[in-house]
Image (cartoon, grey):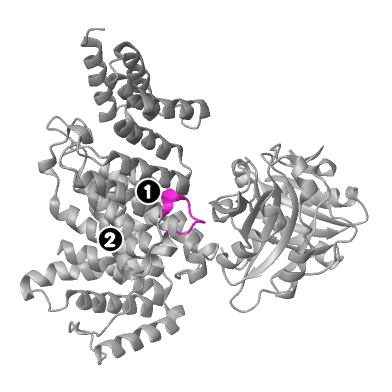
């Protein structure tokens, strides 16, 4: 089974990410990669660099900032191959993100592929696109949502979509926070907002305009919101 | 010098950002060039082509700075090639003759006004990079601390770089979607300046002129687009009334009571020309319609002589385009003027029932005015009270309280 770890950083706990945490992170990465658990992942640029896209009444609405204003802010993700939710939660508890904030663990549906990410192409930039729900939209609207397959086929064919999947509903999520060396695991997502992450895609584009063009064509643009967040490569600070 | 500044600053930063991709470097080099001009022009005289002189000095400053950081070798070469091509020599001395410099300001405008940037960031970045207002001046103009404004600018530039907002004019098929965002930034700047009272700082009132200059650039660089011309016309019509709309005490004077002899006919003439050009394209938009309404007012010798039925029709048209409740409110006023206050009140009641303008002082203020005209003084007084309570502390509130005193003193 595949699981997504959504790293949510708490600005008030930023000081917890010290040299020791950095060392723990490096060994976590090394261990998960060597054991074949870690399929892919990336640090993300801060929420200040996020852009949110939606379509309402046929009009494209682009806004500066993340899909929801939360105390803890999405700062990165990993996709792990694990035998069970419990194993994924254990890995989460060993990642320093869980003591500088929280890690939300979400199961991917069975059909999600197990593929690593390629290096960015020459002159390209990679974005994580979070597919999110909008509580203002009537849930009954979802009965009429267009299938996502044509969008996937098109973006895959153009080499823009590198990976992506829906997530199992937030109700089945577990969130890990380590405080005073003790792991606190709660049911549900990291943020108690009505907006929730329903899926994600990794996009490779020439620039933000291309990412916005791709996002607006996603069926969820009409019923939810799409947050486009640039990857933050480790060699850049 | 001030004219050269306004004209050339944006041209220089736009070209340097295009060539180096470095926003801070572009600003610093433009600053260098203008500082040199301030030192040298009074002594040596103003060069024949001040713009070309400034561009050459700024580009040389960029080459100097880039040479000091080895990572930018490719960019230095590109810049040096451009300098040679344009001046015909690699001379380090500006000779004031560097051929036609491509105008990159359109790229800069569309990048600064990109919808992925917050509105306040778009406004700040546009003013900083295109007009050369300093961070301190922009902060003063928008009544925020300088540190706040500096942070806003840094954050916007970071987002452009990190999220990779492209430095380009959107393709033709994306223009209709992107244009309104750009025009909204310019109109917001204009209105900030226009609503500044006489007592406020000069830099704030100067925003009107900055906005007009930017609209002019946009209209010139996009000659096939009617809405920038419409916006320019609208601004000029409004600015023509700037001195008449406030009295000596700083109180607002309504359009009806303004001394029309003080309206600036030169600006009205210019506005009319831009509006005619825009309308000739036969692609109406909200700014052209607003300018046409302003044009109706400008054409009337007295408030009574205003073509109110025409204005009411234009507002109907505008309401169809924008769907804005404020437009509907203005339409109610125009209908009241053309068909009588009772007809206007009927439209207002519908708007009040709709609730879209709840909490906005304009709604009770308009109702109060129509009731006053009908001689229903007691009802008018309570509507004025309601409006004044919602109006904040500006000249609007003083005006409403003055009207309140007026209707209270009338016999009931």
> Closer to the N terminus: mark 1 or mark 2?
1
- The residue at 12%/77% (across/down) is B47
- The residue at 46%/54% (across/down) is B155
Tell which subunit mark 2 falls on: B
The residue nearer to you, when weighing A191 against B343, is B343
The residue nearer to you, when weighing A205 against B365, is B365
At numbered mark 1, what does the secondary structure look like: helix, strand or loop? Answer: helix
- The residue at 12%/72% (across/down) is B40
Query: Going by the picture, which residue comes out furthest to the right?
Result: A83
Query: Where residue B353 sits: x, y (%)?
Result: 51, 25
Location of the C terminus of chain B (image quadrant): top left
The answer to whether residue A15 is above or below residue B163 is: above
Would residue A182 appear left or right of B74 to someone viewing this image? right
Would residue B118 appear left or right of B124 to someone viewing this image? right
Query: Where residue B200 sits: x, y (%)?
Result: 21, 38
- Marks 1 & 2 on one chain: yes
Tell which subunit mark 1 falls on: B
Q: Nearer the viewer, mark 1 or mark 2?
A: 2
| Mark identifier at residue B276 | 2
Magenta segment range?
Answer: B113-122
Query: Where residue B164 sits: x, y (%)?
Result: 53, 66
The quarter of the picture where residue B180 lies is bottom left
Query: Where residue A208 sits: x, y (%)?
Result: 56, 65
The answer to whether residue A159 is above or below residue B95 is: above
Q: Is residue B171 magenta?
A: no
The crowding category of the residue bearing disc 2, from other C-alpha atoms within 10 Å (few below 14, some 14 to 19, many at least 20), is: some
At numbered mark 2, what does the secondary structure look like: helix, strand or loop? Answer: helix
Q: Which residue is mark 1?
A: B149
The answer to whether residue A29 is above or below residue B391 is: below
Asked if labels 2 and 1 touch by Cβ distance under 8 angstroms, the answer is no
Q: Is residue B117 magenta?
A: yes
The quarter of the picture where residue A36 lies is bottom right
């Amino acid at each position: 089974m595949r699981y997504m770890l959504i790293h949510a950083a708490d600005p008030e706990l930023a000081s917890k990410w010290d040299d020791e945490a950095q060392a723990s992170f490096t060994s976590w990465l090394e261990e998960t990669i060597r054991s074949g658990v870690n399929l892919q992942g990336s640090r993300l640029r801060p929420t200040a660099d996020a852009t949110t896209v939606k379509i309402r009444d046929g009009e494209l609405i682009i806004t500066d900032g993340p899909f929801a204003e939360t105390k803890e802010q999405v700062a990165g993700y990993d996709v792990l191959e694990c035998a069970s939710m419990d194993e994924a939660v254990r890995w989460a508890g060993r990642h320093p993100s869980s003591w500088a904030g929280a890690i939300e663990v979400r199961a991917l549906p069975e059909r999600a592929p197990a593929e690593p990410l390629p290096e960015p192409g020459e002159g390209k930039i990679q974005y994580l696109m979070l597919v999110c729900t909008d509580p203002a939209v009537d849930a009954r609207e979802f009965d009429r949502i267009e299938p996502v397959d044509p969008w996937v086929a098109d973006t895959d064919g153009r080499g823009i979509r590198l990976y992506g999947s829906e997530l199992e509903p937030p109700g089945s999520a577990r969130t890990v926070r380590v405080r005073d060396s003790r792991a606190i695991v709660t049911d549900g997502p990291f943020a108690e907002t009505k907006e929730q992450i329903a899926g994600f895609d990794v996009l490779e584009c020439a620039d933000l305009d291309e990412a916005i063009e791709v996002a607006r064509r996603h069926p969820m643009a009409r019923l939810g919101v799409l947050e486009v967040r640039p990857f933050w490569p480790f060699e850049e600070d | 010098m001030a004219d050269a500044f306004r004209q050339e600053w944006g041209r220089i930063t736009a070209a340097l950002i295009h060539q180096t991709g470095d926003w801070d470097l572009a600003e610093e080099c433009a600053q260098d060039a203008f500082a040199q001009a301030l030192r040298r022009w009074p002594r040596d005289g103003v060069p024949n082509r001040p713009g070309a002189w400034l561009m050459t000095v700024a580009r040389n400053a960029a080459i100097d700075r880039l040479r000091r950081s080895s990572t930018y070798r490719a960019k230095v070469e590109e810049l040096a090639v451009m300098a040679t091509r344009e001046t015909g020599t690699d001379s380090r001395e500006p000779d004031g003759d560097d051929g036609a410099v491509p105008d990159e300001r359109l790229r800069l405008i569309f990048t600064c006004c990109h919808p992925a940037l917050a509105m306040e960031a778009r406004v700040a970045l546009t003013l900083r990079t295109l007009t050369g207002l300093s961070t301190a001046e922009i902060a003063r103009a928008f009544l925020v601390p300088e540190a706040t404004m500096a942070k806003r600018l840094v954050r916007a530039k970071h987002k452009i770089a990190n999220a990779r907002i492209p430095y380009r004019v959107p393709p033709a098929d994306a223009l209709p979607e992107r244009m309104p965002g750009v025009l909204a930034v310019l109109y917001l700047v204009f209105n900030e300046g226009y609503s500044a009272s006489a007592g406020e700082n000069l830099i704030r009132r100067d925003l009107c002129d900055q906005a007009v200059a930017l609209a002019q650039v946009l209209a010139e660089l996009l000659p096939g687009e009617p809405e920038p011309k419409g916006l320019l016309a609208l601004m000029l019509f409004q600015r023509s009334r700037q001195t008449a709309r406030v009295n000596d005490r700083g109180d607002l004077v309504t359009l009806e009571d303004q001394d029309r002899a003080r309206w600036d006919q030169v600006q009205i003439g210019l506005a009319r020309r831009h509006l005619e050009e825009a309308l000739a394209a036969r692609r109406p938009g909200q700014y052209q319609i607003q300018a046409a309404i302003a044009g109706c007012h400008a054409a009337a010798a007295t408030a009574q002589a205003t073509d109110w039925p025409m204005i009411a029709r234009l507002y109907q048209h505008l309401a169809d385009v924008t769907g804005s409740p404020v437009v509907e409110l203005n339409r109610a006023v125009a209908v009241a003027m053309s068909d009588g206050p009772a007809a206007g009140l009927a439209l207002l009641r519908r708007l009040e029932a709709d609730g879209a303008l709840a909490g906005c002082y304009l709604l009770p203020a308009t109702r109060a005015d129509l009731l006053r005209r009908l001689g229903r003084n007691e009802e008018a007084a309570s509507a004025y009270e309601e409006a004044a309570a919602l109006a904040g502390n500006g000249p609007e509130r003083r005006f409403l309280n003055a009207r309140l005193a007026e209707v209270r003193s009338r016999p009931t």
